[in-house]
Image: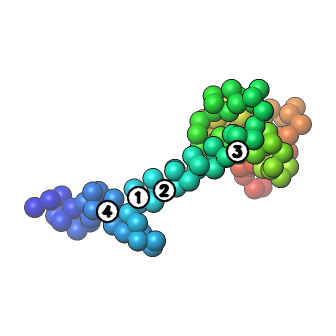
Amino acid sequence: MTQGIDSGKPAPSATATKPTMGGLTHSEARARGQEAARSRNAALKSKLPKRSMDLVDGVPTLYQGRLMKALLGELSAKAAIRAHCEQCVGWEDTKPRVGGCTTYACALHAYRPYQEKP
Ligand code: SF4
């Protein structure tokens, strides 16, 4: 007997192969999403000036698309502030760090994302 059957819950490997709404497994859907993001990022990168490419290459893949759009002027002001704050905290643990930012002298402080509502 496997652990999944004994506990009444599906084994972890069973959830990986369980079809999603689109008929894909979760891992297939994630792989497709990552491939689509790589394709979008490549298209954005081709528009960037050379001086910006080194900057983008040093950023985690998850944030590259938003940063490139910001550099190209393709984001709203709100989304550009979000990208700036994510960059400010080093692209790590962004939600709590930006939301909990205590740099009250920053001109963007009142506009930063992830703030707790009073
Ligand atoms: S609000 Fe905070 S996280 Fe955002 S740019 Fe200013 S100092 Fe950085």
Amino acid type, callout 1: Glu
* Residue 102 seen: no
- Looking at the picture, how far across and down is residue 105, in whole percent? 87, 31
Q: Quadrant of ligand 1?
A: top right
Which quadrant is the N terminus positioned in? Answer: bottom left
The mark that comes first in sequence, 4 or 2, is 4
Which residue is rendered at x = 79% and y = 39% of the image? Answer: 71
Q: Secondary structure at mark 4?
A: helix
Q: How is the image coloured?
A: rainbow
Q: CA distance from mark 3 to mark 1?
A: 24 Å
Amino acid type, callout 4: Thr
* Label 1 sits on residue: 28
Q: CA distance from mark 1 to mark 2?
A: 6 Å
Q: Circle 3: is it few (<14), some (14-19), or many (20+) Cα within 10 Å? A: some
Quarter of the rendering containing residue 107: top right
Q: Residue furthest left?
A: 1
Camera-side residue of 21 and 7: 21
Q: Is residue 100 above or below residue 6?
A: above
Which residue is rendered at x = 27% and y = 62% of the image? Answer: 14
Amino acid type, callout 2: Arg
- Is there CB contact under 8 Å for labels 1 and 2? yes
Query: Is residue 111 toward the left or the right of residue 56 in the image?
Result: right
* Residue 62 seen: yes
Q: Secondary structure at mark 2?
A: helix
Q: Is mark 2 within 8 Å of ligand 1?
A: no
* Label 3 sits on residue: 44
Q: Is mark 1 within 8 Å of ligand 1?
A: no
Query: Which mark is nearer the camera, 3 or 1?
Result: 3
The mark that comes first in sequence, 3 or 4, is 4
